[in-house]
Amino acid sequence: MKKVLLLFFLIVSGFALANGIDVEAVYSFDEKYNYTIDLGTNDWKSLKTHQEKVEVSQIPDEILSKLTTTALLDSILDYPLLIDIYAFNTVDEGYINVFESFNGLHEFVERSNYTNTLANKYFSLKTEYKNGNIDVFLDMFFCKLLIDGMNLDIMILSSGDYVYTPNGSSVFVLTRGEELSWLERLLINYQMDSAYPNATRLGMATTNYNCHSYAWYYQSNSNIYWMNNPSAYMSDGSYSISTPSTGDKVFYTYADHSGVIYGVNPNNVQNPVTVTSKWGSCGLYQHYLNDCPYSGSVTVWD
C-alpha cells in the first residue's frame, strides 16, 4: 500500500510540475493513515520491545506532510501506542513521552490550525456520542487525553500522607482515589492490552496507586497511595545498586518509572528480565523489561 501511495504521489507531482502547478496546493491526503501493523494481529504480537512498536508505527514522511490537519488528527487517534499517555504519573508527562517518540504529533503541533481542529473534533464527538457509539467514545476519550496533555492540566489531588523507607526517611504520598469511570477503566485496559499483547495485566486501570508506590511501598492491588518521588529509597542507604535478581527493584531513570523484578531467564537473550509494574493510571502488568511504555536506562536496586 505504501508503494502504491508513493507512486501515486510521484505521478501527481510530475504532472503538476510539468504544468506549473503548486504541488503543495493541489495534493493532500484527506483520509487518515492506515498503519502497517494493526493491534490484535500476530505481526503486532511478534514485536517484542517498545522501541520496535514505535519504529513500525511512524507515519512515512512522504505521507505525513501531505495529510490534511483533520486527517492527521484522525491518524493520531489511531496511533497504536497513544494509550501510553496514561502510563505515566501525570497526563502531561505521558503526553511529552509520546510526543518525543511519534512523528505524527510533531507534525500536528506545527500546523497553525491544530488547536481549532482538536477542539472542533472533540466537541463534535461529544455531540455524536449521544447515540452511545463505543468507537465515538474511544475517539472522544483520546481527544480529551490530547487536550489535557497539550494544555499541561494539573491533576486535582485530594489529600496527602507520609510513608517511610526501611531506613526511616519520610516519603510524601497522595491519596487520589478513583478518578476514572468504569467505562474509562475498561477502555484503558482494552487499549493497553492490545498495544502490549505480550504483557499480562494483573490489575485494573486505576488512579488509586502508581508504579513507585507499588514497587517501593506496598505490592498489592489494594494499595491506596500515589507516590511521585521515590528517590529517598535510593539515596538513604535503604537500597543499593545490584545485578538483576527476583524481588529487586528496577528504576527507569529517564521515564521516572519503577517496578519489581519477577524473574530472570538468561536463556532469553532479547528479554531476560521480567518485571511487574503499575503503568501510571493504567493497570498492573507483568512484562519484559523493555516491552512496556518506558524507554531509556534502567538501574537495579536490592
Image: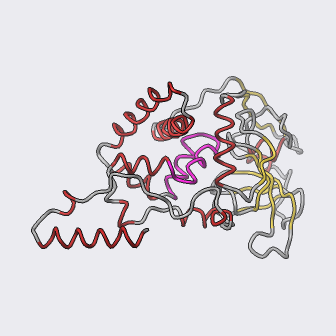
In the image, residue 37 sits, relative to residue 110, either above or below, namely below
- How far from the left and from the top, in percent, is residue 182? 69, 29
Q: Which one is nearer the viewer's eye here, 206 or 170?
A: 206
Q: Relative to 110, is 185 above or below? A: above
Q: Locate residue 108 relative to residue 56 in the image: left or right.
A: left
Residue depicted at x 55% and y 49%: 82
Instruction: Report how many numbered discs are placed on residues in the image.
Output: 0
Image position, residue 71 (x, y; %): 37, 49
In this rendering, position of residue 46 left or right of residue 24: right
Q: Nearer the viewer, residue 282 or 254?
A: 282
Identify the residue at horizontal 45%, vertical 32% (top origin): 125
Q: Main secondary structure of the magenta part?
A: helix
x and y percentages locating residue 163 in the rendered image: 82, 35
> Which residue is rendered at x = 38% and y = 66% of the image?
61
| Residue at position x 74%, y 59% in the image | 198
Quarter of the figure with residue 24: bottom left
Q: Is residue 274 above or below residue 193?
A: below
Locate residue 280 relative to residue 32 in the image: left or right.
right
User: Foreground: 189 or 154?
Assistant: 189
**Residue 223 occupies quadrant:** top right
Horizontally, is 136 left or right of 184 in the view? left
Q: Quadrant of the C terminus?
A: bottom right
Q: Look at the image and give the residue range highlighted in magenta.
A: 78-101
- Where does the image place residue 30, in percent across and percent down from the top left? 33, 51
- Residue 122 part of the magenta segment: no
For the N terminus, the quadrant is bottom left
